[in-house]
Image: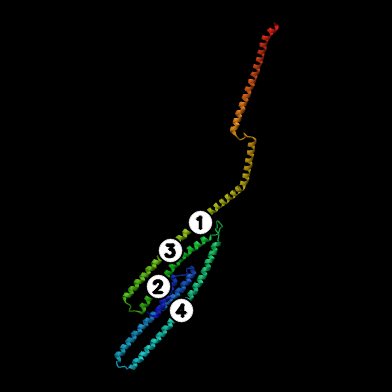
Amino acid sequence: MSPAADVSDAAQNHIEGELQHPSSETQLSDEEVAVRDACIARIKSALLAQESMRVVNVALQHKLSDLFRKRRAEDKNNEPDKSVTDQDQRFANVMTSLKQLRSEYDTMERMQQQVDQEFKAKLQDRKQEFSERSEEFRKYRRQVAVSSENSRTGKSIPLKVVEQLEAQDSRKEAEVAAVRLENIKLRNKLKRHEQTLRQKEELAEGLHLIDFEQLKIENQTYNEKIEERNEELMKLRKKITNVVQVLAHIKEKLQFVQEENNCLSGDLSAIDAQVGEERDQLPVAKQQRDQLRSRNNYLKEKNGLLGNDALLRDFEQRVDEVQDLKSELTHLQELYSRLTRSVKVQQVQTYNQAVLPLILN
């Protein structure tokens, strides 16, 4: 392989490495992707031009070799007796032409390397500018998300939710960017193969049919890969749509739960306030209870039967019994009085009956 091919392959590998490993700190916006795609397209165009010039150079070298070989054959047939001096002169002319071709090749290689370095420097500047702007955009987006308020609840979005949304958005953008870059890479590779095929058809007319069929098979394979990538891209887009719908549903559910939580928080605050009021009134109630207890004890001490139903009922029974006994006592006293009077009367009568006859005698 020629040095120009090595330089082209190295530059191509470097660009593909940059495409496959984008910066993980930032994500691409549409405008920045377009700018970077334009830079990559220019680099690809320069690489294709370099490859085309390399193919042209190889073809010219083959033609020059065939021409020298034909001339040597003609010289041998027409002038077999040429002197050594003429051969040396031809050799010197060939070496001069070869030196001139090498000088032109070195000049073209230096120019190509300079162009590659310029494009690499521009690409690095674009990447740096993109990183700075992406970081500014990320900070601005986070600031807007944190400072925004819910239209219903009036509360700001929690930082944890914002970070989760940013992480999810970063993952989805990384997936889309990876698929997009892979698609660009395959398209450019297809263009490069098509360009190489056209150049070989134009410059190498003696290309074998087997090589042509092989290139057609490779082209078909790459087309199938592109179709597969496009299908994967469509699947990812559908997946992103589904994820967005699920995310919207989750946001609505989260908003409903937040509203319910706010209502419950209001009820809890009212209950806490009521508990606080009851707690404040508790010492007063305890004091009143102690006062009533003391008053009750005092009344119990003052009125022993107060509050004791059994003793009150027994007391009532005893009072009734006392009343009955008093009535019976009164009756007995009256009976005793009557009996006493009767006894006295009997005694008087007996005395009269016993003494009066004696007195009279």
Q: Nearer the viewer, mark 1 or mark 2?
A: 1
Nearer-N-terminus badge (3/1): 3
Is 332 situated above or below 63? above
Name the quadrant containing residue 217: bottom left
Looking at the rendered structure, the secondary structure element under dot 4 is helix
Badge 1 is on which residue? 254
Q: Nearer the viewer, mark 3 or mark 1?
A: 1
What's the distance in space between the residues labelled 2 and 4, CA to CA? 21 Å
The circle on residue 189 is 2
Pointers 2 and 4 in contact (CB under 8 A)?
no
Looking at the rendered structure, the secondary structure element under dot 1 is helix
Name the quadrant containing residue 233: bottom left
Please, what is the three-letter code of the amino acid marked with disc 3?
Leu
Nearer-N-terminus badge (2/4): 4
Number of numbered markers: 4
Q: Taking 77 as reference, is 165 left or right?
A: right
Looking at the rendered structure, the secondary structure element under dot 3 is helix
Residue 46 on image: x %, y %: 43, 77
The circle on residue 115 is 4
What's the distance in space between the residues labelled 1 and 4, CA to CA? 55 Å
